[in-house]
Image (tube, rainbow, N blue to C red):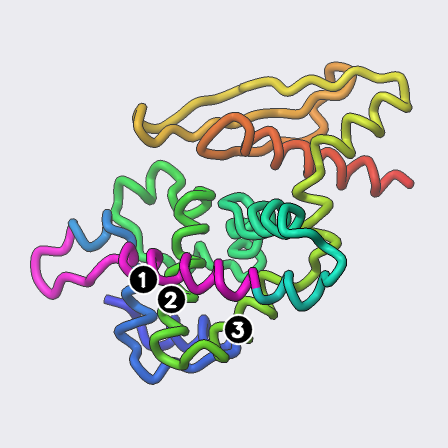
Amino acid sequence: MYKQGKLKELEEKIGYVFQNKKLVREALTHSSFSNEQKINKYKNYERLEFLGDAVLELLSSRFIYATYPEMSEGQMTKFRSTMVCEAALAFCARDLSLGSFILLGKGEEATGGRERDSILCDVMEAVLGAIYLDGGIEEADKFVTKFVFSDLENKQLFYDSKTLLQERIQKQGKDLVYELVEERGPEHDKIFVVEARIDGETAGKGQGRNKKAAQQQAAYQALLAEMSKE
């Protein structure tokens, strides 16, 4: 069961109080949890995620159109795809500590599902879908403006981390390689763990549902470490 205090904590974090508490509980429930319940089964977040994805596409399109009048249609499409991709939304979810609120089954919990990009992204979209149903498009817009469209400079650093790190390391005359150090989980839902190594030394570590996402996280951690030396 979901404790009322935990819901209140989340509402305080996101700055929105749900009239229909069932919606937010559904948004936070992974299918692995609902499948384990013998009685009083919770609905999982998949339908709300579907809705939230559509709401996010509309609101992000409106935001980019209004904020960047010099951008062409092609540039806007590319920017939107990076701003609301799986890795970016997982990044936003971590800022909210959203993983700590998710209801997971025992197996999913044991395999690190609480910090998995795919799940964090899905729940971020599901929460948005729940807010839209509960409070309308303007409340949904407030949520994404505050937690998705904010701090874009730092997020752009994350999106471009591999390129920026490569340029920086090349100028220093050093070697940068990405080493796959671990694979875990079933074949259909693997998690890859990658280290970014500079001259043989581990400079950053990341994980993701594919090697590219794991490399991006590793590059971002390494880039932050490099910048902290300045």
Amino acid at dot 3: Asp
Instruction: Tell whether label 2 touches label 1 (CB within 8 Å).
Output: yes
Which disc, if any, is residue 129? 2
| 22 or 59: nearer the viewer | 59
Report helix, strand or loop for mark 2: helix
Q: Residues within 10 Å of mark 2 (few under 14, many from 20)?
A: many
Q: Could you say which is closer to the camera, residue 182 or residue 134?
A: 134
Residue type, label 2: Gly
In terms of depth relative to the viewer, which is nearer, 25 or 127? 127
Residue holding disc 1: 48
Query: Residue at (48%, 79%) from the top-left corner?
Result: 139
Point 30% across, 77% down: residue: 21
In the rendered view, tell whether residue 162 sits above or below residue 84.
above
Residue 45 lies in magenta, yes or no? yes
Expressed as whole percent of the image width and height from the top left, the position of residue 66 reads 67, 68
Which part of the image, by quadrant, shows the N terminus?
Answer: bottom left
In the rendered view, would you say 156 is above or below 135?
A: above
Mark 3 near mark 1, Cβ–Cβ under 8 Å? no
Q: Mark 3 or mark 1, which has the lower sequence index?
A: 1
Q: CA distance from mark 3 to mark 1?
A: 16 Å
Label 1: how many residues lie within 10 Å, few (<14), some (14-19) or many (20+)? many
Q: Provide residue 143's location: percent of width, then percent of height.
A: 53, 71
Q: Position of residue 127 (x, y in %)?
A: 40, 65
Predominant SS along the magenta part: helix
Q: Which residue is mark 3?
A: 141
Where, by quadrant of the figure, is residue 146 drawn? bottom right
Q: Which residues are magenta?
A: 36-61
**Classed neighbour count for the residue bearing mark 3: other residues with Cα under 10 Å, few (<14), some (14–19), many (≥20):** many
For image coordinates 59% across by 49% down, the residue present is 77
SS under mark 1: helix
